[in-house]
Amino acid sequence: MEKTVLISGGSRGLGKALSDLFFREGWNVVAFSRTATPSETRNGKATFLVRRADIRLERDMVELTNMIGEKFPTQKLLVLNAGAITPSRPFIESDVGDLRRLLETNVIGSSFLLSLFLELSNTIGAVHITSDAATHNYPGWGFYGSTKRAMDHIIANLAVELKGKVFLSIDPGDMDTEMHRIAEPDADRSLLKSPDSAANEVYFRIKEALENAGY
């Protein structure tokens, strides 16, 4: 059956690499971010839509999911890739306002989009792009890691509540992206994965999980 994937934060880094890969594999793709330039591309029967939308704004998410519901009567998968990050710093040097901003995108915005998405017909699941900071303790990564852990728990709980659908949290590893440069500007970039390499690994895990679930 024809499939459509909605990817948040899909205009750069891992999100862009995943969007391109899904499209090459024949999926309809709807990718969005706050900075995206809207576009539409076709490849045979597949459509690639890029939309500008802010995951923190409820009206944007309502408009986006309504459009998907009307335009794509297909099996639908959500990839929660959009994320906010701050420079890593010790807790006692941190501003709790940073945590509020991270929660707004990484947990609240993502959860609201997820709730709207699951109300659409023919949804087959959701994938959360997480981080090893959600399960390991690294100096300076407490705020970011806690928001990723919270979303991991929501995804795991959905796997119990909605059996038959696919719910995964996938850690793509440390990548050479703008987000990583914000968090650790002095990191050795040569030790980091490229977004394209990470996208291939993530896509394989998603494909395997969907096939195992019968999709």
Image (cartoon, rainbow, N blue to C red):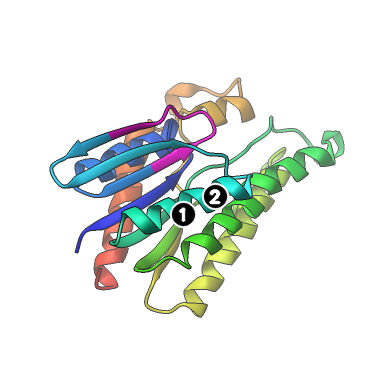
Which percent across, then down, holds residue 213? Answer: 29, 72
Q: Dividing the image into 4 quarters, which one contains the C terminus?
A: bottom left
The amino acid type, in three-letter code, at marker 1 is Thr
Residue in view at x 81 percent, y 39 percent: 97
Question: How crowded is the residue under tag 2: few (<14 C-alpha within 10 Å), some, or many (20+)?
Answer: many
Which percent across, then down, holds residue 13? Answer: 43, 32
Seen in the picture, residue 160 relative to 82 is either above or below; the reply is below
Mark 2 vs 1: CB contact within 8 A: yes
Query: Residue 166 versus residue 200: which sits nearer the camera?
Result: 166
Query: Residue 75 versus residue 183: which sits nearer the camera?
Result: 75
Q: In this rendering, would 42 be left or right of 186?
A: left
Disc number placed over residue 61 in the picture, else none: 2
SS at mark 2 in the image: helix
Which percent across, then down, holds residue 79? Answer: 43, 52
Q: Dividing the image into 4 quarters, which one contains the N terminus?
A: bottom left
Is residue 150 found inside the magenta-colored segment of the image?
no
Q: What's the magenta region?
A: 31-40
Seen in the picture, residue 136 relative to 53 is either above or below; the reply is below
- Disc 1: which residue: 65
Residue in view at x 38 percent, y 34 percent: 16
Residue that sits furthest to the front in the current view:
70
Distance Cα–Cα, label 2 vs label 1: 6 Å
SS at mark 1 in the image: helix
Question: How crowded is the residue under tag 1: few (<14 C-alpha within 10 Å), some, or many (20+)?
Answer: some
- Quarter residue 195 falls in: top left
Q: In this rendering, would 136 be left or right of 164?
A: right
The amino acid type, in three-letter code, at marker 2 is Met
Residue in view at x 39 percent, y 53 percent: 68
Which percent across, then down, holds residue 153? Answer: 59, 65
Q: In this rendering, would 89 be left or right of 15?
A: right
| Residue 38 visible in rendering | yes
Residue in view at x 60 percent, y 57 percent: 112
